[in-house]
Image (cartoon, rainbow, N blue to C red):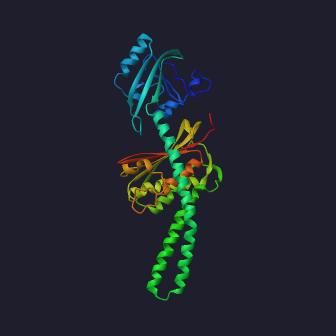
């Protein structure tokens, strides 16, 4: 059997490397001959695991697809399949449209192009949420500025009043006023801190993850934090402290949802041909924080990154909002998929130059 072609910029399939859509080439026996980076990213699988294997190993057996492929091989006609459901390894099933085109090049007979059905809706929703979140953060920052000055006056007046009071019971009231003023002052500082000046430098993302892991285990020693790292990932240029804080906020949020007991997975991977902030990048860093907790309440799931929104009694509602702000300053993106028993936060950060 001929050796399956590998990813190479000079090979017969070089033009498919830069496509954002997922492309798979198969031979006359429906054996996979080529997978482009878009398909690797979509199906969450490496081409090395699939080249030379039957297409069924990648797609399973969606109803009607096998017969359509056989017909395309026999008649040399194109085919478009709609609403195919494919199960991915360690990820949610996806719904796809599939276009099959007969070809005759380098041992390949069919070109399969896959497009997620909800991709355009997802992009539009993300843009809408981004604009809405930016507007909300601007409003919150303006409110924080307006509140900070009166808080200083309230605290100073309470201190002066405390010195004038001889009754210890009355001083208890001024102690409460001072403590609450300090708490609100700290809250305002955190609301405004997401726009501190960045200090970017080259760093290994796994150093960041290990630092977060140590901090969380010191706070929640009963947690089981499992690591699934791709150690071949290159260094990125980023603000170390901001990334530590962003990941720490997400992992701490997961630990609190688990009441300090349960499993958290820290996962790092490479993503190819990724669109971030309307820009296309050849390579991006993908970080995932996955827990087996109760999930995010449905009523706040769409607002989980908004300031002052929390699913936990006593929570400030700032941790995830600050995490999102830090990631966006790095031209990255953060998203969440949650259901009872599995919540996955995914961070994408650009590595290579734009396409």
Q: How many labels does the image show?
A: 0
- Residue occupying the point 46% across, 29% down: 115
Q: Where is residue 66 in the image (x, y as percent from the top left)?
A: 37, 20
Depicted 133 relative to depicted 283: above or below: below
* Horizontal relation, residue 296 to residue 106: left or right: left
Depicted 323 relative to depicted 82: above or below: below
| Pick the front one: 129 or 351 | 129
Q: Position of residue 242 (x, y in %)?
A: 58, 54
Q: In terms of image quadrants, where is residue 10?
A: top right
| Pick the front one: 116 or 50 | 116
- Residue occupying the point 41% across, 11% down: 74
Visible in this render: residue 105? yes
Q: In terms of image quadrants, where is residue 84?
A: top left
Q: Where is residue 304 in the image (x, y as percent from the top left)?
A: 44, 51
- Residue occupying the point 38% across, 57% down: 261
Depicted 296 relative to depicted 75: above or below: below
| Pick the front one: 290 or 156 | 156
- Quadrant of the image for the C terminus? top right
Depicted 334 relative to depicted 19: above or below: below
Visible in this render: residue 295? no
Q: Residue most toward the top? A: 75
* Horizontal relation, residue 149 to residue 55: left or right: right
Q: Position of residue 75 (x, y in %)?
A: 42, 10
């Amino acid at each position: 059997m001929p050796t399956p072609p590998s990813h190479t910029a000079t090979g017969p399939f070089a033009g498919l490397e830069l496509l954002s859509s997922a492309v798979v080439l198969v031979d006359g026996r429906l054996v996979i001959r080529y997978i482009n980076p878009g398909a690797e990213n979509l199906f969450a699988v490496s081409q090395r695991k699939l080249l030379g294997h039957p297409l069924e190993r990648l797609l399973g057996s969606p109803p009607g697809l096998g017969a359509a492929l056989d017909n395309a091989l026999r008649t040399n006609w194109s085919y478009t399949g709609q609403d195919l459901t494919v199960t991915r390894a360690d990820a949610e099933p996806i719904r796809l449209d599939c276009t099959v085109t007969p070809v005759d090049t380098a041992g390949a007979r069919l070109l399969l192009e896959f497009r997620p059905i909800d991709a355009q809706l997802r992009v539009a929703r993300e843009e809408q949420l981004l604009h809405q979140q930016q507007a909300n953060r601007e409003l919150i920052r303006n409110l924080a500025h307006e509140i900070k000055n009166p808080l200083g006056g309230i605290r100073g007046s309470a201190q002066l009043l405390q010195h004038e009071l001889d009754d210890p019971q009355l001083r208890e009231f001024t102690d409460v006023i001072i403590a609450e003023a300090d708490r609100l002052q700290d809250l305002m500082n955190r609301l405004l801190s997401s726009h501190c000046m960045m200090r970017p430098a080259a760093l290994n993302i796994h150093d960041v993850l290990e630092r977060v892991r140590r901090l969380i285990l010191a706070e929640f020693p009963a947690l089981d934090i499992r690591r699934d790292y791709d150690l071949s990932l290159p260094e990125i240029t980023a603000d170390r402290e901001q990334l530590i804080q962003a990941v720490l906020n997400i992992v701490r949020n997961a630990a609190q949802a688990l009441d300090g007991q349960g499993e958290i997975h820290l996962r790092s991977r490479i993503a190819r041909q990724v669109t971030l902030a309307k820009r296309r990048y050849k390579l991006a860093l993908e970080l995932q924080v996955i827990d087996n907790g109760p999930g995010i309440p449905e009523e706040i799931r769409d607002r989980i990154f908004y300031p002052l929104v929390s699913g936990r009694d006593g929570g400030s509602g700032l941790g995830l909002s600050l995490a999102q702000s830090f990631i966006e300053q790095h031209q990255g993106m953060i998203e969440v998929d949650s259901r009872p028993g599995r919540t996955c936060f995914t961070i994408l950060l650009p590595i290579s130059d734009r396409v």
